[in-house]
């Protein structure tokens, strides 16, 4: 194994051989030119002696040049070995290591900086994944703990009657629905993120106006219960993509706008298109959101800029919206409203745009 490692055509060896070939070739050309220039002025014996001495000098210079090239190549490639060693040491507990190249500002420095930037992205993604798993576990554990507690308490009560069992069944049903909703949301989020970059499994035409109208119809009872004033302007907004994901995008925005509103608040929805872009705007009144907390709302398990606040919902609504937008080559932004509430704007390539085909 060690023999194969030593004999493998490494970059250092190839550079050395290339330098040696070039050096010997250049030397041979110089010897030939010198011989052609002086051969008429020399006797045959002197000519042979000149050729022998020139060849000996060529071999000597070539060997020194090859050795020097080998040393120089090794020194030049040392940062690459440092990159390789760092990559081999990387693991879950060593993602904080960096090359930190401090040499000349050349191609090697650019490679080292690129590698360090890649490690920064990997580390950030790994930390985000750990937070996501921890939060998902916490969110799933809560309804399961509620169900187990209710069941244990009711079964341990020898005087529990039918009414108590009915109450327990209602609590268990509500907790199971919350767990099912969370699992469904996680699956949608995973599906959306898997299709980020335009790798959509399905591509059909979908009207955001129709999806939004359906979402408003599904929330009509809740809207009426809390007395919201709804203002709509639903103009055609054709896009091309996965209809299931786009329908969830509209549904999540409307559900969030209703869920995080207050009694007798307002809800406004607009859709439209200009031939290149289609958009959906959903705004609502509600509790105040600090502008600094707005970007965090698109992170999983964030509600109102706080992690796991215990508010209704799974905290995945806007993160799903962002993932669906990314999968369809669109953008989403949110603006905190003066006095409370949020306005979210989704912009996607229109079905009429050439890039949407």
Image (cartoon, rainbow, N blue to C red):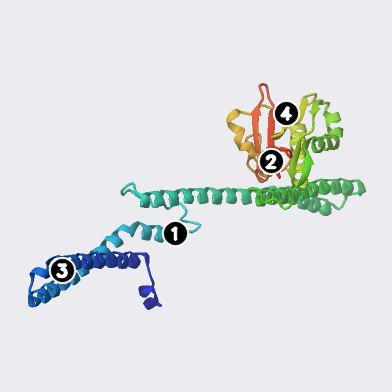
The first of marks 4 and 2 along the sequence is: 4
| Residue where numbered disc 3 is placed | 35
Residue drawn at 59 percent across, 51 percent down: 129
Disc with the residue nearer the chain's start (3 vs 2): 3
Query: Element at badge 3?
Result: helix
Mark 4 touches mark 2? (CB < 8 Å): no
Q: Is the Cβ of the residue at disc 1 closer than 8 Å to that at disc 4?
A: no
* Residue pictured at 72% horizontal, 37% vertical: 350
Picture coordinates of residue 32 (x, y %)? 20, 68
Q: Nearer the viewer, mark 1 or mark 2?
A: 2
Marks 3/1: CA–CA distance: 54 Å
The residue pinned by badge 1 equals 87
Asked if one can make out residue 315 in the rendered structure from this viewpoint, the answer is no
Whether the residues at callouts 1 and 2 have beta carbons within 8 Å, the answer is no
Foreground pick, 250 / 187 = 250
Question: How far apart are labels 3 and 4 at the CA level?
Answer: 89 Å
Mark 1–mark 4 distance (CA, rounded to whole Å): 47 Å
Q: Give the Cα distance between marks 1 and 2.
A: 43 Å
In the visual, does 91 lie left or right of 343? left
**Quick one: SS at disc 1?**
helix
Which callout, 3 or 2, points to the residue nearer the camera? 3
- Give residue 283's mark: 4
Which residue, given by chain and number where applicable, does mark 2 sit on? 354
Q: Is residue 324 above or below residue 268?
A: below
Q: Position of residue 337 (x, y in %)?
A: 67, 24
> Which residue is outermost to the front?
40
Distance, label 3 to label 2, CA atoms, is: 70 Å
* Residue farthest along the right direction in this orientation: 162
Please give the name of the residue rendered at 78% of the width and 39% of the height, measured from the top-left corner: 251
């Amino acid at each position: 194994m060690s023999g194969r490692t030593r004999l493998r055509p490494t970059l250092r060896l190839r550079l050395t051989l290339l330098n040696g070939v070039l050096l010997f070739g250049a030397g041979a050309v110089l010897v030939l030119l010198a011989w052609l220039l002086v051969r008429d002025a020399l006797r045959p014996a002197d000519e042979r002696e000149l050729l022998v001495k020139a060849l000996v000098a060529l071999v000597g210079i070539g060997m020194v040049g090859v050795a020097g090239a080998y040393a120089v190549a090794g020194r030049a490639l040392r940062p690459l070995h440092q990159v390789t060693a760092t990559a081999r040491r990387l693991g879950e507990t060593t993602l904080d290591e960096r090359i930190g190249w401090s040499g000349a500002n050349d191609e090697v420095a650019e490679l080292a900086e690129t590698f360090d930037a890649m490690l920064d992205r990997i580390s950030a993604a790994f930390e985000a994944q750990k937070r996501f798993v921890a939060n998902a576990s916490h969110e799933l554990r809560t309804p399961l703990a509620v169900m187990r507690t209710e069941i244990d308490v009711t079964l341990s009560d020898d005087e529990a009657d039918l009414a108590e069992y009915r109450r327990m069944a209602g609590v268990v049903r509500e907790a199971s629905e919350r767990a099912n909703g969370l699992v469904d949301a996680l699956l949608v989020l995973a599906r959306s993120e898997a299709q980020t970059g335009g790798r959509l499994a399905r591509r059909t035409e979908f009207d955001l106006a129709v999806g939004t109208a359906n979402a408003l119809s599904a929330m009509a009872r809740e809207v009426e219960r809390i007395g919201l004033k709804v203002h709509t302007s639903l103009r055609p907004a054709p896009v091309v993509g996965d209809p299931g994901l786009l329908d969830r995008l509209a549904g999540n925005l409307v559900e969030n706008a209703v869920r995080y509103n207050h009694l007798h608040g307002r809800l406004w929805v607009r859709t439209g298109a200009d031939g290149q872009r289609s958009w959906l705007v959903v705004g609502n009144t509600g509790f105040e959101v600090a502008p600094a907390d707005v970007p965090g709302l698109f992170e999983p398990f964030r509600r109102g800029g706080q992690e796991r606040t215990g508010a209704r919902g799974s905290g995945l609504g806007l993160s799903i919206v962002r993932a669906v937008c990314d999968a369809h080559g669109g953008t989403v932004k949110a603006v905190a409203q003066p006095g409370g509430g949020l306005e979210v704007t989704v912009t996607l390539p229109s079905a009429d745009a050439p890039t949407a085909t």
